Image (cartoon, coloured by chain):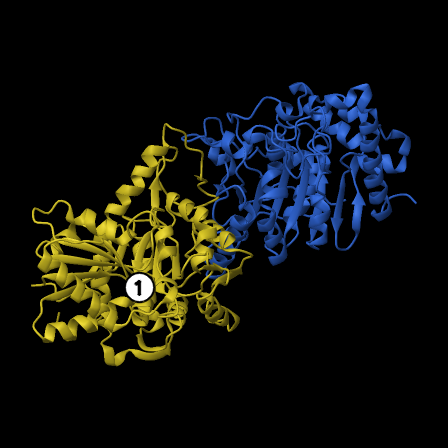
Chain colours: A yellow, B blue
Amino acid sequence: MSKTMIKYPIHTQEILNVNGDEAVAYAVKQSLVDVVSAYPITPQTIIVEKFSEFVADGLVHTQFVPVESEHSAMSACVGAAAAGARAFTATSSQGLALMVEIVYIASGMRLPIVMAVVNRALSAPINIHNDHSDAYLMRDSGWIQLFVENVQESYDTTIQAFKIAEDERVLLPVAVNLDGFFLSHTLENIRILPDEAVADFLGGYRKVARVKVDYYDEEVPHMLNPARPLTFGALDLYDYYFEHKVQQVEAMKNVPAVVREVNEKWQELTGRKYGDGVIETYGMEDAEIAVVAMGSSAGTIRSVIKKYRERGEKIGLVRIRLYRPFPYEDVGKILSNVKVVAVMDKAIGPGSYGALYQDIVSSLYDLSDRPLTVDYVYGLGGRDLTQDMVANMIEQVKEDVRKGRVENKIRYLGVRW
Amino acid sequence: MVVKTLPEFPIKKGEPAYKLWIFEPGWKGEIPLNFNLRQVAEQKRSALLPGHRLCAGCAAPIVVKLASFAFRGPTIVVNATGCLEVASTIFPFTSWAVPWLHNAFENAASTASGVEAAINAMKKTGRLPYEHVDVVVFGGDGGTFDIGFQALSGMAERGHDVLYILYDNEAYMNTGIQRSGGTPKYASTTTSPAGEVIPGKPENKKPIADIMVAHRIPYVATATPAHWMDFMKKVRRGIEVVGPAFIHSLSSCDRGWRHENAISIEVLRRAVDTCYFPLWEWTPENGYMLTDRSLVIARNPSLKQPIEKFVEVQGRFRHLMKPENREKLRELQEYVDKVWEDLLRRASNAPR
């Protein structure tokens, strides 16, 4: 794509010095959100704090509902989205665990809610720092899950999330995952779009999808509309529940295409894109060793791989941006020629492998020539991932390739035994 | 008294049922303070249509029907999980002629908060085709006294313009008559059975309406569908006030209370006649005000019936009628008397 085609080239975009949470709050401010309902929890708090400033200063039309728990935050979002509003909430860790009951209801009712999940470890022991255990908690809830790498991407993805969620082919809620403290509390200069550009990108206020209901002779808006009353959240017995769950799965199948589309449209608008929107790769064209990771760690890993690349070693990085629905086939294709895959899981699954590792292995199973796989659990409770650790890991998997087999499928980076 | 009539909703034969409740965009319904209830009841149709699967003798649909007669215009109903929800919306059928939302058991109040916020936001941006949309919640005692109390309290504290109607059948009837915070003392339920040692639920009922009064919201009332005029007036007042309103309606359950299903309304009448469930309303201006039958009893205490009158027709209190449990019954009477005396002291219109 030539630079002239970009609608807002980088030099026309204003610079904002913000942390990840503020970037999300700013994106929400620009996204013409009708209802924001949230409860404070570290490290998400800044999103809500910053947003309440926008509300207090009258910069948004949004109704801010400062509820008494995360459970109610998601409940209010369900109510608001069902009433036809664009709704947003944000949470972390225990807050997500508390709201998880309603998280399932939001996706089951096909309500395009957007939620920023500022990833944080789950108790016990209580810990406020980053890992992905909270995101894995909701991985089968029917939500679209996107993982971002830096503050700029937090801003971009939050706006994109509304577009993805409200697409008629999708109509599913979206969780934007950003790493607690690493992104939420770290200042970065980001480029922002003018308000009208964001409004234009999203097509103004939320347009409610129309649905065909047997009772009416016309397509009616999928919302609580006194002119065309609908019943939301009816009781489904064994005769319909299964079909409705399958409809959710069918909607999920449309998601990767929509995410790619939105990613391209974003590039036309801003000049920025993140891989193909679903997966971002670095040096995977001829790689023999692949590292798979999600979130902010990708930056650290990329810089290490860059050094290896300069020495001529064939190592690549696969960053999963769309974690649910998981792009099994694409991952399989990308990893079909490597000798070993090191999967980096920022959460522990007692009695099991890491969640990302299981997905990667599922992607590889149908390959005729399967690479070796290793599950690296790292960064729990906010433990740093240093470049040395990554280099150490790469040396270990190189050794595995030499041996031709993997002992110790689960390995820990940076843990004291 | 000035009586303003509500706009008519003429119903033609053969028209689909939803048209009964259509409020077309641009409709600006009058919101009269004084209105002729009889006329409203004649003109309006219930928001709950026939064909629901609630038990014969259940008072919940009567609560909903009476309440919906008092709706003033476009209304969104939010329902907590419970008998009313599961029996009225078995997919692919629905009994609701108004937009209706069910989220989960404990969050009807916070869901309604979100609905109300959405209405305000859309109004602000000129996207709401109505002047106002009312939000009404129906919740059972489990979802209100117990698991949903936090959400209810939060909604009241934040001041959402929502009317919360509690239909209190005094136990978790949907799951098979387990005790709740609304179950009265000595009632036998499946999780507080009357046994050899423990005669039913050992604890008293949670004074939910008084707790809502303590939230200092604009309107709190108790009601029963047996006193239907009083009930509808209270619902209308609850809708008309700006801010949260709470109506605690006793709602008999013939399965759980174990009485003849033909006497549901009679049981509720006895609850008021014995002062087990006094009728009152509370506003910040007037404080507690006795209404309807309870006001009559306050003026003429000889009309007050002994608690036996309420207890004797219900199987859940059968063990209290045994001679060895006379003491328990006396204790129950003392408690009811104490609460009633307490209310008389507080009620601004009670005779001194």
Q: Is mark 1 on a helix, strand or loop?
A: helix
Give x and y (percent) for residue B34. 71, 45
Give x and y (percent) for residue B175. 54, 30
Q: In which quarter of the image is the C terminus of chain A?
A: bottom left
- Which of the chains bears the disc numbered 1? A
Residue A269 in sight in this render: no
The residue pinned by badge 1 equals A157
Vertical placement of A149 versus B340: above or below?
Answer: below
Would you identify the image quadrant in which residue B65 lies? top right
Would you identify the image quadrant in which residue A416 lies? bottom left
Side (left or right) of A288 relative to B244: left
- Kindly identify the residue that appears in the image at 61 percent across and 26 percent down: B58
Q: How crowded is mark 1: few (under 14 residues within 10 Å), some or many (20 or more)?
A: many
Give x and y (percent) for residue A242. 33, 33
Instruction: Give the residue type that dot 1 points to.
Output: Thr
Q: Quadrant of the N terminus of chain A?
A: bottom left
Vertical placement of A227 versus A321: above or below?
Answer: above
Residue extending farthest to the right is B352
Vertical placement of A26 versus B50: above or below?
Answer: below
Residue A137 in sight in this render: yes
Side (left or right) of B301 relative to A148: right
Side (left or right) of B337 relative to A186: right
Q: Which of A130 and A325 is in front in this view?
A: A130
